[in-house]
Image (spheres, rainbow, N blue to C red):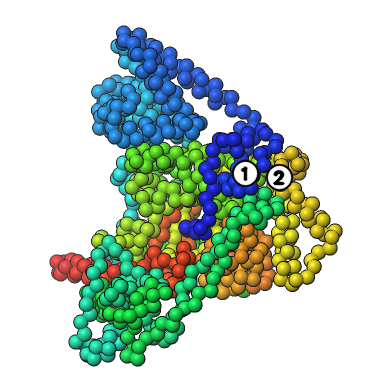
Amino acid sequence: MEVLIPEQERLSRYQNDVRRISKFSTVPRVPRNGEVGEILGHGSEESISNKEENGNSGSSDLRTKLSSKKRQNNRESESSCGKKMAKKRRNASNKRRRFEDDCLDFEFEEDEELKFLLKARARKRGSNFDSVMTEENSKDAREKNYRLRNTNACSASKNTCTPKNVKGNGEDRLKCHQCMKKRTVVPCTKCKQKMYCIPCIKQWYPRLKEEEISELCPFCRGNCNCNACLHSNGMIKTPKRVISDGAKIQNLQHLLYSLRPYLKQICEEQTREIEIEATIQRKSYSELEVPQALCHNDERVFCDHCATSIIDLHRSCPKCSYELCLHCCQEIRKGSVTSRREVKFQYVNRGYEYVHGGDPLPESSLSKISKEQAESFTKWSANDDRSVICAPREIGGCGKCVLELKRILPQGWISSLEVKAVDLLETFRIVERKCTETSKKMLRRAASRVDSDDNYLYCPASRDILQEEKLLQFRQCWTNGEPVIVRDVLDQATGLSWEPKVMWRALCENVDPEVSSKMSEVKAIDCLAGCEVEISTVQFFRGYTEGRRYYNFWPEMLKLKDWPPSDKFEDLLPRHCDEFICVLPFQEYTDPRAGILNLAVKLPPGVLKPDLGPKTYIGYGIAEELGRGDSVTKLHCDMSDAVNILTHTAEVVLSHEQHSAIARLKEIHKAQDEKEHLDREKLNSDQVGQSDNEEMEISEIAAIGKFEISKIEVKRDASPVFSSEQATEETGSALWDIFRREDIPKLEAYLRNHSKEFRHSYCSPVEQVVHPIHDQSFYLTSEHKRKLKEEFGVEPWTFEQRLGEAVFIPAGCPHQVRNLKSCTKVAVDFVSPENVGECLRLTEEFRLLPINHKAREDKLEIKKMIVYAVDQAIKDFEALVSTQRSISEAAL
């Protein structure tokens, strides 16, 4: 669910400079005109939680005690060894150790982040950066060290969880497997090798007690999140449901049966083009030899006119190498080819006050809006013999040479695949299996449509889906284009932590040394202005759990953009990737490595594959709908199927002051909306708008938009406070709205009619709509959903995703998401045979978008998947049938 952000100015970095104020300050500095970095007026990195407002002296005292205790241990070690360090080296060592203690509490400052990253970089090179970072840090050396030095201590604690602080003959305390420091540890009585210190247990395994660690340590449980284990491959075995040969044959039959019509369309399209080429060259169909184009497996070939992927036959210019797909060739011959004009529009930054409901900056300080310019499209038609001339120079071609027919795959290979598929399906008839009636316990109400039988969604538990009948029920819902929810998927996992700080720590240790220095900051999206910003990694994750706010107490909502990069998720976080694949429901469809019904895994090893994930989405969220600046994924439509698992949540508690400020600011936003609506009506009708009294009232309300905190009246009794004690385990964390495919035309009509009521980048009203869904410019609030149902009778499936639930989104279903809490979601795309038709429909929609539209590129290459999936299915089918025949003959 990638969010498409239009081209715009990037906001400056969040830093603790003169532009930042303390949360205790009352009057913010007023930004000057033209200061883009101050548009949003972000608050300080200090949290708005009650914990921070009341101080954090307890943790400070604890860190002081730990630091003094460590210095005392250092003196004891020096006296026992009879040696003294140089003062300079000792001070540097103490600084590093104090820094490591701060890392445990995740409270280090920005300048210390660099030290942490430098230490990670040095550890990756294997240098002796610290006394702890020796070759004993390797897995084998550490285990050997445990066996030689700690066997007696572990065996002595076989039936007890008493922490060990053993000293003998000058030996320091035992080393913790997590942090590799010599501390008071709890040994494991099962493996008798691994042991964990008390601070690490509290910090990284808060759900495990010391007794549980003693009985079975995190390493033995398979959820150890130390740096060495997080970077180890193969520790988590991905369980695959045992599928009999008979079930595999039935699945392959279902795959071939579903893909056969689309493979037939591809063959017919190529046959027509070969016949036209044979006529042009005055040859028979069988005599024509199509030359092969030079194309490597690691290359993608796209049409230069519509940007659609080319899988085999296409036309190419011998002079300028302009390439054209067969679909565009047909449109040129019919005279229906259209211009793929470029959209020239950019939202304008109207300043900080405007974003928060106030007046915009003077027009003289605003950059001019680039409006769309009409471009004349040069006539492009075919010759009398239906040959096609290269595109005119105005659109990228030379306009002179006749395009030649070329091929990428072996000639006649696709048509032979179709023949084989038909023969197999006719030889082995498909026996349709009927699924049983779905229990009410496995349904969740998600809509209240009148005269509709799809108001309930299929919602089984993860422990039940291994049954074959559950797969049939899933397939039936999936064929109907209905979403599916699977509960408690994390119950099947090993318990590996999905906390963002654990993932960040693993990522810092695993990145390339040249990249590690850049990990101290991340690129995030500010949901209020829809702009990309840079923020300290520590500040972002602190805000994830404790919240952030602007100067005016409005909640600040941030989302991470491409963290870690989706195409490197498996390489950078191998343990988390294995854990995610381990818990995927209905792995016949979703397994990105070996799903038998996942077309994406059927591509040969040498062929370039699309990036389908897994991908991580981390964003803030609160339960109250703000109406502006909510943490949302705006309405969009994915080209492929997807499954999204909520792996971690954190609830932010808002103060009384913030609730009161939010209520007041909402009124100001409403006044701004009404004022701009009246201005548009006045502009369109060329009439005098409102009376002087109304204008005075609106201007007075909008004047508060300057938002000096001293002018905001804060009433503690104005609104209730959300308390974590009031939340239950059943509280949802993400609100989903998924629309039916049949409702897309009505949904698009509503969005076009009401587009001016929505805001996009820099909180500017949506001025231009290219495609209501693919632009990703709209999020329908509860008020808009109510109006949509009243005007068009359209209602989406609406439900709350809880922690550990997996949501299946069919291809072609428009959907939007709002975070009710801070959420970490992990998603993976897949291509099911039931939704190939929708993938092709979306491919056709994308090719008609303007040339610079970000959703235009054919990243999925669904036609290529169809061809290779049929080829692989035929090979697997024939191999299984041959094996069964051999077994039968041997039995006789």
**Mark carried by residue 707:** 2
In the image, is 624 to the left or to the right of 564? right
Task: Please state which amino acid type lies under the numbered disc 1.
Answer: Gly
Q: Please say if 209 is above or below 532.
A: above
Query: What SS does tag 2 mark?
Result: loop
- Which quarter of the image is occupied by the C terminus? bottom left
Q: Which image quadrant for residue 843?
A: bottom left
Q: Which residue is mark 1?
A: 41
Q: Residue at x 41, y 24 (%)?
A: 96
Q: Residue at x 64, y 47 (%)?
A: 33
Alpha-carbon span between mark 2 and mark 1: 10 Å
Q: Is residue 688 visible?
A: yes
- How many marks the image carries: the answer is 2
Residue 222 location (% of width, % of height)? 36, 40
- Contact (Cβ within 8 Å) of mark 2 with mark 1: yes
Task: Please state which amino acid type lies under the numbered disc 2.
Answer: Phe
Residue 810 location (% of width, % of height)? 47, 65
Residue 297 location (% of width, % of height)? 26, 64
